[in-house]
Image: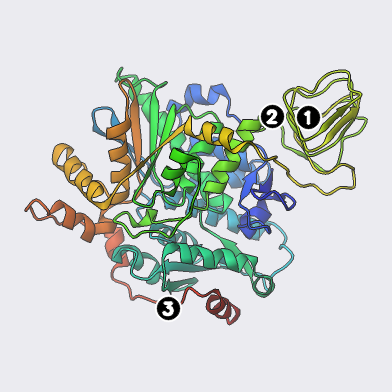
Amino acid sequence: MRYYSTNHSVEPVTLREAVIKGLAADRGLFMPEVIRHLPASFFDEIQDLSFQEIAYSVADAFFGEDVEADALRKIVYDTLSFDVPLVHVRDNIYSLELFHGPTLAFKDVGARFMARLLQYNLTYQPPLQGGAGSEVNVLVATSGDTGSAVANGFLGVDGIHVYVLYPKGKVSPIQECQFTTLGQNITAIEVDGVFDDCQALVKSAFMDAELNQHMMLTSANSINVARFLPQSFYYFYAYAQLKRLSKSNPAIDLSQLVCCVPSGNFGNICSALFGHAMGLPVKRFIAANNANDVFYQYLQTGQYIPRPSIQTLANAMDVGDPSNFARILDLYARSVVGILSAPLAPVPGGSPASSSSAPSGPVLGGSLASSSSAPSGPVLGGSLASSSSVPSGPVLGGSLASSSSVPSGPVLGGLSAEASTIAVIPSADPRAVHSAIISLISGATYTDDQIASAMRQCYAETGYLLDPHGACGYLALTEQLKPGETGFFLETAHPAKFKDTVDRILSADGKPSDIAIPDRLAAFMQGTKQSIPMSRNFADFKQFLLSR
């Protein structure tokens, strides 16, 4: 599998390059060239499979070409050493509890998978060219849970050093303890700014030639394909659990499932949408925002207007310019022009000339010569000449002329055999892309008062304890579920990670609250804080890294 940039101006790369580099050279995010639809047999038996078995099938569709089967199975099984149970909350609403991992947050899945995949590539593959030394330096910006999950996922891993950038005073004390008390190969950097400033420092570092000559850099944020793609695992597992429950609960209609995702940088819902493209049987999605409602406004207007983030109770969602929005746009641009997936991996290189047979699927950016038959679908940006039949697959940016056969798998590249391979997805009509997105995704946005009210009400009426992020998902389902639908929301972190906030909210009615802190969290709180203060000026951050 090869991975192209959402900015479409550099050559596609291998999985290994995408994982280690993190961000494309043109500042785009990497996307897999092919999204494979999982077979019907997988969904027929999914209710009888374990979480690890389900995850391995999904992982194999993305990574199976590049990672040996036994190694990939070990990576998946080691990553998922904990359960992700689906818990009934009320009526037709369920919570997918993603806080049973080592750091009690959903990011344990992606971070642990990435740590193991990166270590596999460093151990069993030759080193990449560029960058001084053999150590890989992982840069990660966090608004809360990412830092702890990544730091603990990579803790003690030979050949990897992690730098966690976090906004000063804008993560909970317990979250801060989880990545500032570790030492060893983990360095915490306390940035005088907001999460968007931390993310900007990380992205600027990737683009700085001097830094990249000095040290090998990669990212563990959801911009990294090894972080966000594995998050699709638990959506399939949620479906498996609902399918099991449906056998004894006729109220669950498997054709009427709604998934609600509390959303900040949009890596989580992006992985859900990739799952949907692979066949995940979810009817529709809801993206639940706090007051940082850039995506919600896009859904309403079709206009994406980033702005500075606002500090809220749901701090991990305090993002004013979500990186993964670019992936969502690209995914549905592919859908609009009909090049979402193909049965075979792309054929890199130049034009296929005079071939008697070829793989099946769309043709992108290449030229086709001498054809008597052609692919099915629209021709976008190319020309047709001397062909005996009209193409029935998309031909994007190239030309068709007099060919006796045509490729039926995606051909990515230039107009000659010598041309370099560049994945070109043409600009789809923004209105069509917006229409495709809103046909599947609705939005919701909530103030701190609404979040707090939902937490109190849910606890009083059901006894279920929400964290501020899960509260956004729960509230959206209570408002937007239609008759006959069953919904599940993601409870993304253990409420104890926000103990001060949760206790304050639940005590508002005069009843004192003192939620218990799990032993795993309590252990982090015994450590000594070790962090390095940093301005939001890239020159200061660059100088710090150059001194390492």
Q: Is residue 340 left or right of residue 45?
A: right
Disc 1 packing (10 Å; few <14; some 14–19; many ≥20): some
* Residue assigned mark 3: 533
Corner quadrant of residue 345: top right
* Residue assigned mark 2: 343
Indicate the position of residue 65 as horizontal and vertical percent values: 68, 41
The quarter of the picture where the N terminus appears is top right
Q: CA distance from mark 3 to mark 1?
A: 54 Å
* Residue assigned mark 1: 359
User: What's the residue at 39%, 57% (across, down)?
Assistant: 145
116 or 473: nearer the viewer: 473
Q: CA distance from mark 1 to mark 2?
A: 8 Å
User: What's the residue at 41%, 47% (across, down)?
Assistant: 263
Q: Secondary structure at mark 1?
A: loop
Q: Is the Cβ of the residue at disc 1 closer than 8 Å to that at disc 2? A: yes
| First in sequence: mark 2 vs mark 3 | 2
Indicate the position of residue 463 as horizontal and vertical percent values: 17, 41
User: What's the residue at 51%, 37% (across, down)?
Assistant: 273
Asked if residue 304 can be seen in this view, the reply is yes
User: What's the residue at 70%, 57% (across, down)?
Assistant: 125
Disc 2 packing (10 Å; few <14; some 14–19; many ≥20): some
Corner quadrant of residue 120: bottom right
Q: CA distance from mark 2 to mark 3?
A: 50 Å
Asked if residue 50 can be seen in this view, the reply is no
| First in sequence: mark 1 vs mark 2 | 2
Q: Secondary structure at mark 3?
A: strand
Relative to 179, residue 358 above or below? above
Q: Is residue 517 left or right of residue 387?
A: left
Indicate the position of residue 138 as horizontal and vertical percent values: 55, 65
